[in-house]
Image: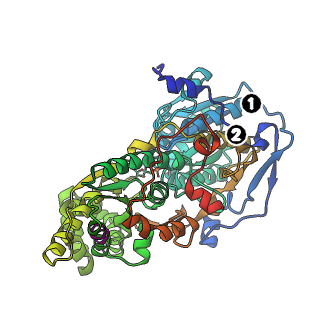
Amino acid sequence: MKQVISSLQAARAAYQPKLPKALQGPVVAVEGKPTESVGNQKEIKELFPNTYGMPVITFESGSQPVLEPFNVGIILSGGQAPGGHNVISGLFDGVKSLNPANKLYGFILGPGGLVDHKYMEITPELMDQYRNTGGFDIIGSGRTKLEEVDQFEKGIQILRELGIKALVIIGGDDSNTNACVLAEYYAAKKYGVQVIGCPKTIDGDLKNEQIETSFGFDTACKTYSELIGNIQRDCNSARKYWHFIKLMGRSASHIALECALQCQPNVCLISEEVEAKEMSLDDVVTYIAQAVADRALDGNNFGTVLIPEGIIEFIPAIKKLIAQLNDILATPEAQNLGRSEQIDFVKSHLTKDNLDVFNSLPTSVARQLALDRDPHGNVQVSLIETEKLLSTMVATKLDQWKKEGKYVGKFGTQHHFFGYEGRCAAPSNYDADYCYSLGYNASRLIANGKTGYMSIIKNTTQPASEWIAGGVPITMMMNLEKRNGKMKPVIRKALVELDGAPFKFFASKRDEWARQTAYVYPGPIQYWGPAEVCDQPTKTLQLEQA
Ligand code: FBP
C-alpha cells in the first residue's frame, strides 16, 4: 500500500544518513581478544558452547571479498523505537552494495512472523517510502518470545525456503537474548544461518562498555522533552497546577533522567535512587510534598514532577512483593486458575509482610502487580497509573500538613503519561544516522560470516565520519537472572548508575531546580540548521563520554 506523505516526510525522505568512514567502502574485520560474559561465566559458557568467548570486532577500511548472492531476513521485536526503518534501510543498502541481486525479507509482526511463515520482500520501492520515518509499520513488530526448539525448527524451514543466510533481530535486552539463543541453536545444528542483533529500546537500558546507547532513546527523550517544556511554559504562565508526568521506561529511569537534564523540572524521581536509599512509598510521597510546600512558601503553587514508569518496582517492599508474586504465578497451580481465583490464590500464598504491603495498595495497583505480565514475565508498569497514585497521596499528606499548620498553599493537579507519543516519532538526525549505520554495519557482520553478534557503533558524540563500527558477541553481555521462577541466561540490563556523571550532575542541581523556577523549554526536534541545534546527542551520552 502506498502511503500518503506529508511535506516534511517527503523532504526527510531525501535525507542521506551519514555513515562512519570505515563503512563508506570495503571493510576488513579486526578481531580483539577472546571475551568472557559479564557474570556466571562457567554457566554461560556451558549454555553457549558455540558462541561463547568470541572476540569483539572492529571494522576498518580494507578489501571486501566478492560473495555469491545471498538473502537476509529481518525482524522487529518488542516496543517501537524511532529509527527502526533506518536500521532496515541501512541493512537494505548494505546487502545490495555487496551484491545487487541480494534480497531482504521482512518477517511480519515480530518474531511470530518467522514462526508462522509470514513475510514480505522489502523491495527498493517499498524501502524508499520508509526512509527516515518513525514507526515500525513497514513490517510491524511483536512480542512473541523466540525460545522453544519447535519455534527454531519452524524458523529454519522458512529461512531455507527463502534462501536466507542471515537473520537480523532488532530488539531490546530480552529479544537480543533470544537472538543469541537462536544463534547458538543454529550453530550447534550446523544449519548455516547466522543471527545478528541490533540494540533497540527507547528505555536506554541496553547499553554497556560496548554499546553506547540503544537506538530510539535520543528521539524519544527529545520528543518527551519538547512536551514537558511546553507543559512547563503553560505551568509557568497559569501558575495554578502541579503537573505529574509519568515517563516510559519499564525498569531503568534513563528517560526520566535525560528529560530532567533537558528540562530542569522541579522534581524528578529516579527509581534506582529510591531503591538504593531504601525509600518507602511514604518517603517518596513526603519528598514530593516537601518540594510542593517549599515552593508554596514563595507563593509558587505550581510545578512539574517527572516520574519514571517503573518506580513502583524499585520501592524495596514492593520489589520484594513482586519477586514473591512472580514465583507464585510461575507455579503450575496458579497458571490453571481464572483471574479472580488467581488473586485469592496469590493472597493465600504470600508471606505476612508481603500480604500487608499487597493489602495496603489501591486495588487497581495490586491487581496490576498480581496479574498482568508481558510475554517475558515483566510487570506491565505502563498500565499502572503511578502519576495519579502519587499525586493523590501527596494531596492527602498536604491536607494533613495544612491541619498541622505546616503548609499554606493550594494544590491543583494535572496528570500526563508520555510513552507512546515518542516511540514512533520521526528519528532525530542522531537516530537517523546511528540506526542507518547499525543496519549497514550488520550487513558487514553477515558478509564476514559472524553469528551471535550484536551490531555496534561507537564514539557517537563525535561527528559521524569518526564513528567506530563493529560487533560484540552477545554472550559477552550475559549473566544468569531469575525469570518466571527459573534462572535464565539474559543480557544484563543497564540501570541508572548513581555514581555516573549524568546522575551526579542532576543531583548537584536538583535542589536549585526544586525551589526556583529554572525551566528549560527545549522545543521540537530540528532536522535542518546549525549542528548545535540539530545534531546533538542526548545530555546523558554527552556527560557519560565527557
Ligand atoms: P522494549 O523494551 O521492547 O523496547 O519496549 C519498552 C517499552 O516502550 C517500555 O518503555 C514500556 O513499558 C513498554 O515498552 C510498553 O509495552 P507495550 O508496547 O507492549 O505497551
Q: Is residue 399 above or below residue 162?
A: below
Q: Position of residue 3 (x, y in %)?
A: 47, 21
- Work out whether residue 205 can be spotted: yes
Mark 2 element type: helix
Specify whether residue 230 is painted magenta: no
Q: Which residue is mark 1?
A: 97
| Residue 36 placement, left or right of 289 | right
Kindly indicate the quadrant of the structure image that contains residue 477.
bottom right
Q: Residues within 10 Å of mark 1 (few under 14, many from 20)?
A: some
Tag 2–tag 1 contact (CB < 8 Å): yes
Q: Position of residue 189 (x, y in %)?
A: 65, 50
Specify whether residue 292 is painted magenta: yes
| Residue 274 placement, left or right of 9 | left
Inspect the image, locate mark 1, and give the three-letter code of the amino acid beneath it: Ser
Q: Which residue is mark 2?
A: 443
* Numbered mark located on residue 529 in the image: none
Looking at this view, is 519 or 199 the one in front? 519
| Residue stretch rendered in magenta on the structure | 288-294
Looking at this view, is 17 or 64 the one in front? 17
Looking at this view, is 425 or 22 the one in front? 425
The alpha-carbon separation of the residues under discs 2 and 1 comes to 9 Å
Q: Position of residue 193 (x, y in %)?
A: 66, 43
| Residue 278 placement, left or right of 17 | left
Q: Position of residue 31 (x, y in %)?
A: 80, 56
Q: Residues within 10 Å of mark 2 (few under 14, many from 20)?
A: many
Q: Residue at x 78, y 31 (%)?
A: 68
Mark 1 element type: helix
- Work out whether residue 164 can be spotted: no
Q: Is residue 93 above or below residue 404?
A: above
